[in-house]
Image (cartoon, rainbow, N blue to C red):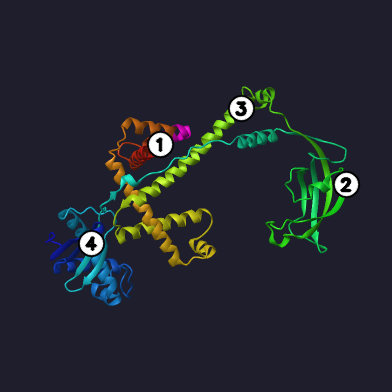
Amino acid sequence: MVGTMTKSSSIKRLKAGRIECIVTFAKEDVESAERKALETLSQNIQVAGFRKGKVPANMVREKINPEHLLEETIHELLPNAFASLTKEHDIKPIVRPRVSAESRDPLTVKITFVEKPEVTVKAKKIKVEKREKTVDEKDVEKMIDYILEKHKETQAVDRPAQEGDRITMDFHGEMDGKEVEGTRTKGHQVEIGSKTLIPGFEENLKELKKGDSKSFTVTFPEKYHAEQLQGKPVTFHVAVTEVESVKRPELTDAFVQKELRAENAAALRAQIRETMKAEEEQIERGRRERALFDAIADATNVDIAPELLDEEVKSMVEEFAKQLERQGLSLDQYLTHAKLTPETFIEDMKRQSEKRMKTRLGVESLVLSEKIEVTPEQTEAAIRGIADRAPEADRLQIFSAYAEGSNAREQLIWQQKVEELIARLLKE
């Protein structure tokens, strides 16, 4: 028996943390709940001669669908049923229980609770290789070239263009006597010898002066990105509007000290090398973290209840839909563009949801088994760090949001524990 609100109940503990309860409600409780259900449903019923919400119960019963009345009656009974069952059988549900009607007379329902499932993690299987990151000196040189390029100086010249000069021009291309769509350009700049335009184009710019015009034909590469131009000859009509000489600085100590505020050229090289190494190491850490979470999911053994998986899928779909909305797309538009049916999309979401749940449950299990704790001082330091990065006007609000016992503080503590777990598993 479950208090006074049921006639009888039975409970069965199943796999994956599922608990199935069959509850038969006492007749007097059903009658009381049905009266409340009729009152609720009467708010939407209109009968001539009666104000809305004041229609007699027998008339309301005639006007409404019996299935709707049954649903509302069960809805009235459930809160007490949930409270009574969870207290008597020490049930700790982690998602809203599922309910289905078993019979009308006597009114019997099946309530399925889902608790956190049992999780085991094969910790020895969690291994992520570390790749030592080195910086290629060629990449350092490319960065130096980029810096010097940003500091180059140009000067207009009244002479024929030569290798290394910068040309400013207007041009368009024609094929078979018709203009090629997308080729008409004004004020385009290119350095002769940079090889940024199609082969042969820059060579034809040599010896041209400001105000000169020239027509020439070049053949597009066979692997050009625009399929309709691959291997095709196109005649270009060019009008030069400016010719400039280009002077790039040399990497000298004097230049570095004046323009880049570094001690000398060698120090700048070392700084660039260290910055690039740090960036590579950051990328490698990101790769290792992703590989670590994949390894945790693979090493986690857990039976996930279908009800729990459904909730996770619903959450992931909602998150994805909001993400699309921020990009100005609807979910239907995305499915059309990606050529996916709703069924294949949901199946993919299920696979992702299952992996995400296994990862999350595996991480929780490892945090407990590793006995990871966070001191109040560590948490306070993290909160101060968040506040320091925020505008001064918002800092008081941040400290208030992370007050003792707040959800934000608990989430931050959990994040700190997960970060410590990652550090231990990656041994960094």
Counting from the top left corner in percent of width and height, residue 153 is at 75, 33
Q: Secondary structure at mark 1?
A: helix
The mark that comes first in sequence, 1 or 4, is 4
Residue, disc 3: 268
The mark that comes first in sequence, 3 or 1, is 3
Determine whether label 3 and label 2 are within 8 Å by CB.
Answer: no
Q: Amino acid at mark 2?
A: Asp
Residue, disc 2: 212
Q: From this viewpoint, is residue 251 visible?
A: yes
Residue, disc 4: 78
Q: Residues within 10 Å of mark 4 (few under 14, many from 20)?
A: some
Q: Nearer the viewer, mark 3 or mark 1?
A: 3
Measured Cα–Cα span from mark 3 to mark 4: 71 Å
Q: Secondary structure at mark 3?
A: helix
Q: Secondary structure at mark 2?
A: loop
The mark that comes first in sequence, 3 or 2, is 2
Q: Identify the residue at image location x=19%, y=63%.
A: 21
